[in-house]
Amino acid sequence: MTIFIKILQFVTSLSILVIIHEFGHFILAKFFKTRVEKFYLFFDPWFSIFKLKKGETEYGVGWLPLGGYVKISGMIDESLDREQLKQPPQPWEFRSKTSWQRLLIMTGGVFFNFISAILIYVFVLFVWGETYLPTSNVKYGIVTDTVGFSIGLRNGDKILSVDNQYIESFYQITPDIILNSRKTIQVERDGKIFNIEIPKDYVKKALKGRGKIDARIHFGPFIISGFGKDSPSKAAGVLADDELVGLDSLRFTYYDEFQKYLTDNKSRTIVLNLLRKEKPLNIYVKPNTAGLLGISRPREQVFELKTLKYGFIQSFPAGIKKGFKTISDYLKQFKLLFSKDTKAYESLGGFITIGTIFPSVWDWETFWNLTAFLSIILAVMNILPIPALDGGHVMFLLFEVITGRKPSDKFLEYAQIAGMVILISLLLFANGNDILRLIRK
């Protein structure tokens, strides 16, 4: 069921964004009186799941969920319709329009994706507000791993600033270090201030999930509120509302100490020291192979979060600001792909990676936030100057505008084929990375 919910959210989000993107092309084509022959969600090689002809346009749903398309008369696209191009240009065809009209039609999808992302952020901020963990509320300091230790961080350090700049949201610290090439972290330790230098190879390790900087959590009170799938604790008789006070008669101050003890002793049965209705109780549990007990506690027991609420008018500038910041951050992430130092391309993922970012339960706030983010990804990817993408068409149109010379139809056809080869190669590479990660687990 968990996988089904993730897939359902991913497909629903993708469908919404594809329709918005293609509608951007469709509405501008119609505005300039250009004929649109097809408007499809997903691709339909050989056959379609559904189709309906209305006016001059066939609307349908294909069976191959790799995006969608609008087929515009007189345009060289992925259909490679050579027969149409052999005929003299007609007034309703794309190739008969002025260069600036064609440019607007081709950028319509990207523009609509950017606008929809911003409007979604406005909607989310108005309905749910913005919840985050203030850096000042991380009162027990941080917890890190061996990579963090190697650069000089210690469990319990309180982060004051990065490059002497205070970061309000704690979980923006690591992205800020990665995306903005930060050089130093200022921390407080035992009442003293330390300046930690960030080595060049830290970003490469952080992109692979190492060198984590997480908020240190106080262990107690640990009131059990739920159980994971195939929870060994639940199978052993642990109940919701039981309070976990220790393991093997040992008490812990911080949650990372509790985790380390579990990891070190995951191969044997452990005694859970509990309080059930204020009465002591011991239950024997064998952790799973990952060293987990399969229990959880309410989020509010862990962090003192802050929620900013926005009125209807206030949500617009806040949503616009968030949208542009997300665009800026994503462009910085994209830049990392081409860095030989970070080797971020090794972390490139395909459909499996995208699908896993959705939660295992349907949460509308998370769904719309992720949909806005994916809308920005779709817009940025489509504007890349690669033939077969919108950006490829834009590149040739800008060449025409600047030089006054239009590339030949034969050249555009060959460029379209080359672009499709590049895109298929990237698709295979990204999804191949996903498969390799699954094999290595």
Image (cartoon, rainbow, N blue to C red):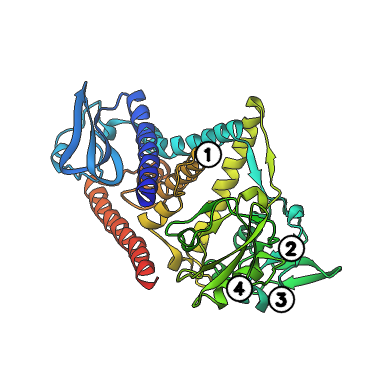
For numbered disc 3, what is the local secondary structure?
loop
Residue highlighted by disc 2:
141
Name the residue carrying label 4: 260
- Name which of mark 3 and mark 4 comes first in the sequence: 3
Q: Nearer the viewer, residue 141 or 275?
A: 275
What's the distance in space between the residues labelled 2 and 1, CA to CA? 29 Å
Real-space Cα separation, disc 2 to disc 3, in angstroms: 14 Å
Within 10 Å of the Cα at label 1, are there few (<14), some (14-19), or many (20+) other Cα atoms? some
How many other residues sit within 10 Å of disc 4, few (<14), some (14-19) or many (≥20)?
few
| Amino acid at the residue labelled 1 | Glu
The answer for how far apart the CA atoms under marks 2 and 4 are is 17 Å
| Location of residue 144 (image quadrant) | bottom right
Disc 3/disc 1 C-alpha distance (Å): 37 Å
Q: Amino acid at mark 3?
A: Gly
Quarter residue 422 falls in = bottom left
Picture coordinates of residue 376 (x, y %)?
A: 48, 44
Viewer-proximal residue among 231 and 397: 231
Q: Secondary structure at mark 2?
A: loop
Residue beneath the point at 49% across and 77% down: 267
Residue 365: assigned label: 1
Q: Is residue 412 found left or right of 339 in the rendered image?
A: left
